[in-house]
Every structure is written in structure tokens, then in C-alpha cells.
Amino acid sequence: MITSRISSKSQTTVPQAVRNALGLREGDELAYDIRDGRVTLTKARTTVQDDPFATFLEWDSEADRQAYADL
């Protein structure tokens, strides 16, 4: 079983094993499904319409994000 701790600000770090299993990257959104006292955590599905630049993966690097952060 994998666990994490809740901070005083009600925040937690998603453990690396969970991030890897869900294929999470910085900026991804999480979805929570609450049923019968249990919560299921999944990677939220986004559509191409949410991000008009999603098809331009060659421009999706840390260097690009830093270079264009102030635009």
C-alpha cells in the first residue's frame, strides 16, 4: 500500500509510483470519484480543444515554457 501525508494546508504530494502508474506530468489534472466512502483517483481526460497547442508537442519542453513564460 502506498501512503502520503496531508500538510497543514490540506496538500499532499502524489507519490512517484502513483504518478508513474497514471502517466502524470506537471500541469496534468486529477479526477476524483467518491462512492460509498471510497475515493478513486485518475488522470483527468482533456481534449485537444482545451489546449490549442496540444498538437505541437515539439514546442512542449521546459526550455520553451521558461522562454515564453512572460508573454
Image (cartoon, rainbow, N blue to C red):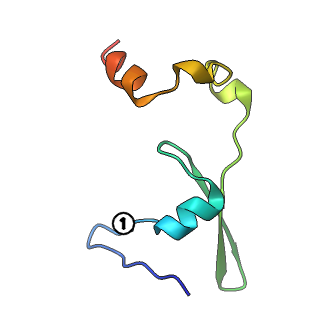
Residue 49: x %, y % from top left: 71, 25
Q: Is residue 27 above or below residue 36?
A: above
Horizontally, residue 8 falls left or right of residue 1, namely left
Q: Amino acid at mark 1?
A: Gln
How many numbered marks does the figure carry? 1
| Observer-nearest of 18 and 10 | 18
Foreground residue, 22 or 10?
Answer: 22
Q: Return the x and y of residue 36 as percentages of the image width and height.
A: 72, 85
Quadrant location of the N terminus?
bottom right
Kindly state the secondary structure of the residue where label 1 is placed. Answer: loop
Q: Is residue 56 placed above or below 39 in the rendered structure?
A: above
The residue under the point 30% across, 16% down is: 70
Say which quarter of the image contains residue 12.
Answer: bottom left
Q: Is residue 46 left or right of residue 64?
A: right
* Residue 22 place in picture, x, y as percent: 64, 59
The residue to which callout 1 is attached is 11
Of 34 and 1, the residue lying toward us: 1
